[in-house]
Amino acid sequence: MPTTRERLLALVRAEPHLNQTELAERLGVTRQRVKQLVDDEGLAIDRGPRGAGGRKPKVTEPTAPSMTGGVAAMAAGTTPAVAVFLAAADLTSRGYTVFLPVTQTASCDLVAIDRDGQVERIVVRRARRAGEEVRYDDPIHGRHERKAMILTDEPVRYEPALSKQRKG
């Protein structure tokens, strides 16, 4: 009778699309054993879903973004990059010219220039409400001029508030 290793290699040759979870089910062994054999053989095989019955991807209906002040509101779980772009869109709609840094080590997320040439360095933070209080993480601790706080289903908030909010 062939060994589990030999059966695994034959199955991978016959059906290269299978992931490690599917291979374990077909071979009647644990996923851990398949992982050990895959690592020993130096094979590049996806791990596949884990847990009882495997993880099913969440399927949600796409919803239209709510509008807040002409800019789409942030959805829960939005990435930091999307939050920066939401703030940039908001500033642009207020008449600012917006620049994004090229490096990830920049001291701010955006540079905005108003029509009078006033330069604003802006750090964007995804924020959340705790009652009436707005909370956000601030690892930089005030080394910037202005914060743009992105809250779900609310307009972008600025701290300190923008003095010029001309549109057009």
Image (tube, helix red, strand yellow):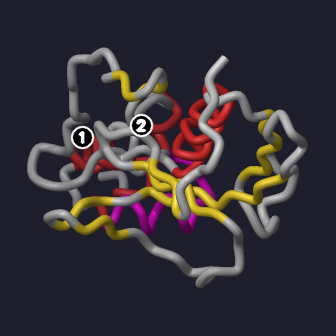
Q: Position of residue 1 (x, y in %)?
A: 30, 52
Which residue lies under the disc numbered 1? 26
Residue at 56%, 68% (x, y): give it.
40
Residue at 63%, 29% (x, y): give it.
166
Q: Position of residue 42 (x, y in %)?
A: 63, 59
What segment carries the magenta color? 32-45
- Residue 58 vs residue 138: left or right? left
Which residue lies under the disc numbered 2? 11
Above/below status of 67 relative to 100 = above
In the rendered image, which quarter is residue 167 located in?
Answer: top right
Distance in Å between CA atoms under marks 2 and 1: 9 Å
- Residue 112 vs residue 69: left or right? right
Q: Position of residue 126 (x, y in %)?
A: 44, 56
Give the total of numbered labels: 2
Q: Quadrant of the C terminus?
A: top right
Residue at 58%, 41% (x, y): give it.
87
